[in-house]
Image (cartoon, grey):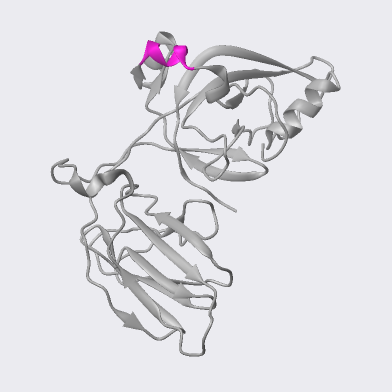
């Protein structure tokens, strides 16, 4: 939910994060009309740039695997860029924009957009940021891996997520994920809800999230909320938490907030 305050509770699914460390890259100056960023060796090169308003930044993937350039706050998302593919985005307002690779979340970059004050304004590459001081941590070589993923609704669009841990032993066995009982100790205020429909439902029904990356209350940990339709009501497709709460208020369905917590990071946000 983007606005309003309410207690959120939810469920959680999994997490498969492949990590990379971004190195430091030298500076360069290009025309104000364009900035080129290369994706290579699991890093954005250069990782931090300063450009004037109106600059179009182009990312080109020269790695042997797919990457994305994805704004931390949802301003842009390239989708998967295969080897040789590129993506461009025009920055039309000033500000600082952090971004990452959705597939390899520790690949990070920053675009600083400044209001142009002169006709000769230039775009300049800066040393790579050390957000989280990751450049000083030795995590060993990156390995590629794959695991099952799911789709869930948030505000009527579909996001992709993983499921890795759950605080309920029975669900852990059923979902083939890690049993993590300590997750249940998470405060309610830090675990938004994931709504799961039980029993009668529309055939295309998916999980419904109460938040997503870019929202101030997002967390990969979710407290499970079970949704059940009243016997006299014909189910409809549920695609947002606001819709669920409104129908519950009208007495058409019941929401049971459980104490089960799941680790289900959203790894791709759709529009």
Residue 155 percent across, percent down from the top left:
67, 42
For image coordinates 63% across by 24% down, the residue present is 8
Residue at 69% in and 32% down: 241
Q: Which residue is drawn at 54% across and 20% down?
A: 223
Image quadrant where residue 163 sits: top left
* In this rendering, position of residue 206 left or right of residue 40: right
Outermost residue to the front: 117
| Residue 214 seen in the current view | yes
Where, by quadrant of the figure, is residue 81 drawn? Answer: bottom left
- Image quadrant holding the N terminus, namely top right
Task: State whether the magenta stretch is mostly helix, strand or loop.
Answer: helix
Pick the front one: 169 or 262: 262
Magenta stretch: includes residue 98:
no
Name the foreground residue: 224 vs 252: 224
In this rendering, the answer to whether 106 lies above or below 123 is above
Q: Position of residue 47 (x, y in %)?
A: 31, 63
**Residue 43 figure quarter:** bottom left
The picture places residue 22, in percent across and down from the top left corner, at 24, 55
Q: What stretch is highlighted in magenta?
A: 180-186
Q: Position of residue 104 (x, y in %)?
A: 32, 49
């Amino acid at each position: 939910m983007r606005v309003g305050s309410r207690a959120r509770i939810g469920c959680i699914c999994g997490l498969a994060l492949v990590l990379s460390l971004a190195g430091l890259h030298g500076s360069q100056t290009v025309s104000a009309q364009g900035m080129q960023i290369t994706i290579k060796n699991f890093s954005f090169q250069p990782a931090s740039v300063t450009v004037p308003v109106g600059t179009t930044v182009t990312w080109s993937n020269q790695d042997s695997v797919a990457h994305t350039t994805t704004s931390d706050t949802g301003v842009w998302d390239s989708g998967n860029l295969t080897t040789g593919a590129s993506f461009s985005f025009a920055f039309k307002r000033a500000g600082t924009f952090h971004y990452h690779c959705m597939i390899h979340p520790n690949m990070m970059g920053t675009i600083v957009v400044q209001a142009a004050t002169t006709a000769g304004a230039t775009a300049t590459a800066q040393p790579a940021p050390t957000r989280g001081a990751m450049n000083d941590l030795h995590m060993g070589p990156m390995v590629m891996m794959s695991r099952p993923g799911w789709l869930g609704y948030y505000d009527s669009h579909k996001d992709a997520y993983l499921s890795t841990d759950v605080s309920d032993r029975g669900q852990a066995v059923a979902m083939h994920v890690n049993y993590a009982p300590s997750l249940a100790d998470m405060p309610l205020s830090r675990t938004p809800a994931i709504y799961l429909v039980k029993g009668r439902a529309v055939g295309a029904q998916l999980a419904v999230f109460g938040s997503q990356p870019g929202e101030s209350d997002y967390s990969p940990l979710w407290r499970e909320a079970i949704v059940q339709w009243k016997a006299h009501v014909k189910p409809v497709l549920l695609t947002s938490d606001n819709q669920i709460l409104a129908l519950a208020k009208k007495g058409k369905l019941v929401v049971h907030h459980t104490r089960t917590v799941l680790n289900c990071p959203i790894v791709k946000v759709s529009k």
